[in-house]
Image (cartoon, rainbow, N blue to C red):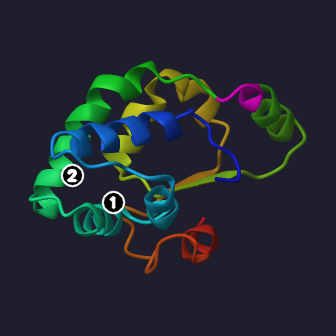
């Protein structure tokens, strides 16, 4: 990501590895690179296929959602983000958030940071925005934002 507001990358990695562990599989860096920035459904399909998991996309995403719900409310901002966002806002720089998350996941991840989020003009959650036809690395989400 260009700028990660809450520091969620490690939590996501741990959640995927937790699911993989149940089946004696390893979530590798190479696999992480394949799914980074893709939609939830696309990343679920890729992980299930690459690791040979006996799960449907829906079951995988439900498991992931439960793990996120346990961890995401406690996520801190990446160091320096608060100061940078406030500086850009005070300088009149328009800002938008472009995330591959679904709105419900984004809301859970950022619940502790509502005051900071209010400084953004727009939030695009590609996980459920029909205007975003293709996930990252395609520019669709950024063009919509």
Give the SS element for disc 2: helix
Residue positioned 50% across, 61% down in the render? 30
Q: Residue at x 39, y 67 (%)?
A: 129
Label 1 secondary element: helix
Q: Residues within 10 Å of mark 2 (few under 14, many from 20)?
A: some
Task: Determine which residue is flagged by label 1.
Answer: 40
Total marks placed: 2
Q: Write down the region rendered in magenta.
A: 78-82
x and y percent of residue 145 in the render? 60, 64
Compared across the picture, whether 31 is left or right of 104 comes to: right
Q: Residue at x 56, y 76 (%)?
A: 140
Along the viewing direction, whichever of 35 and 105 lies nearer the viewer:
35
**Residue drawn at point x = 43 percent, y = 52 percent:** 28
Query: Is 64 on the left or on the right of 42, as rendered?
Result: left
Q: Where is residue 42 shown, x and y percent of the image?
A: 33, 69
At which x and y percent is residue 2?
A: 70, 53
**Magenta span includes 80:** yes
Q: Position of residue 4 (x, y in %)?
A: 63, 42
CB within 8 Å, label 2 to label 1 = yes
Indicate whether residue 45 is drawn in magenta: no
2 or 1: tag closer to the N-terminus: 1
Task: Report the magenta stretch's main SS.
Answer: loop
Q: 110 above or below 3?
A: above
Residue 12 relative to residue 42: left or right: right
Tell me the quarter of the picture where residue 56 sits.
bottom left
Dot 2 corresponds to which residue?
61
Residue 51 appears left or right of 81 = left
Compare residues 62 and 17 and report the one nearer the observer: 17
Quadrant in the rendering for residue 82: top right
User: Which of the two residues, 125 or 7, is positioned nearer the viewer here?
Assistant: 7
Name the residue furthest front: 24
Q: Is residue 5 above or below residue 99?
A: above
């Amino acid at each position: 990501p260009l700028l990660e507001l809450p520091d969620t990358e490690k939590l996501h990695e741990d959640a995927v590895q937790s699911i993989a562990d149940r089946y004696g599989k390893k979530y590798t860096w190479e696999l992480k690179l394949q799914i980074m920035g893709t939609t939830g459904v696309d990343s679920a399909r890729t992980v299930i296929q690459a690791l040979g998991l006996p799960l449907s996309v829906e079951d995988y995403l439900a498991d992931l959602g439960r793990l996120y719900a346990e961890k995401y409310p406690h996520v801190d901002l990446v160091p320096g983000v608060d100061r940078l966002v406030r500086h850009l806002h005070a300088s009149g720089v328009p800002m938008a958030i472009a995330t591959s998350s679904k709105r419900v996941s984004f809301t859970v991840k950022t619940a502790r940071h509502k005051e900071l989020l209010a400084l953004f003009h727009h939030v695009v959650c590609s996980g459920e925005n029909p205007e975003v036809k293709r996930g990252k690395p395609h520019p669709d989400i950024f063009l919509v934002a």
